[in-house]
Image (cartoon, rainbow, N blue to C red):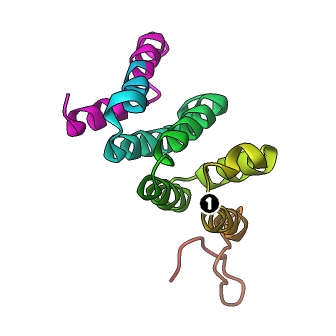
Amino acid sequence: APPPVRAALARVLAGAGSAASRPLRAELLEVLLEFEQVTGRDPDVLEALLRAAAEGSERRPEIRTRALVHRTGMLLVRTPEGAARFDRGLVELARDVPGFAALVTRWLADAPQEWAAVVGPSARRTVEALETSRPSMPMPMQAAGREHGSLRPA
């Protein structure tokens, strides 16, 4: 199948889906990953897979998301262009997908040597900075006098 078809397939197979479809999707995803490793080697397909892994991270077990992100990274970093794309994609997703920066930061802290081969130092610092700069709760806007504050800006 051409790369755009494989990229679309990667997005579907990496999605959380239902419990009934999970085993078949996991098996097909494995076939796709093996193809990309041996034959395909298309960074667009792997980038689509990374995005799907991040966007579905809150709907699947963390260990599965971690394995998928790491394996995708290992396939991308085989070339300098792929390594740069992985770092850019990881930073972009950490910024845009709620909770993903926290996951990546935890993975980097728990197994720094394992991730050093995949995540460049600049991307690592950026993801960690994104996680530490996020407030855990929105700050209410100040109200005048005895009025109540609001979470919405005026």
Q: Quadrant of the N terminus?
A: top left
Q: Which residue occupies the foreground of this view, 32 or 48?
A: 32
**Where is residue 92 drawn, in percent x and y?**
48, 61
Can residue 12 be seen here? no
- Residue shown at 65%/33% (left/top)? 62
Q: Is residue 18 above or below residue 142?
A: above
**Where is residue 15 drawn, in percent x and y?**
43, 30
Q: Which residue occupies the foreground of this view, 130 or 88?
A: 88
Name the quadrant containing residue 30. top left
Query: Residue flagged by tag 1: what amino acid is it?
Result: Gly
Can residue 139 be seen here? yes
Count of picture labels: 1
**Where is residue 52 drawn, in percent x and y?**
43, 40
Name the quadrant containing residue 67. top right
- Queried whether the magenta region covers residue 24, the answer comes back as yes
**Where is residue 42 drawn, in percent x and y?**
32, 42
Judged by its main secondary structure, the magenta piece is helix
Q: Residue furthest bottom?
A: 145
**In the rendered view, does 16 fall on the left or right side of 61?**
left
Q: Which residue occupies the foreground of this view, 94 or 139?
A: 94
**In the rendered view, does 112 fall on the left or right side of 140?**
right
Q: Residues within 10 Å of mark 1 (few under 14, many from 20)?
A: some
Region rendered in magenta: 1-30
Q: Is residue 57 above or below residue 98?
A: above
Name the quadrant containing residue 41. top left
Circle 1: element type:
loop
Query: Which residue, given by chain and number where applicable, does mark 1 sit on?
Result: 120
- Residue shown at 35%/32% (left/top)? 10
- Residue shown at 59%/70% (left/top)? 151
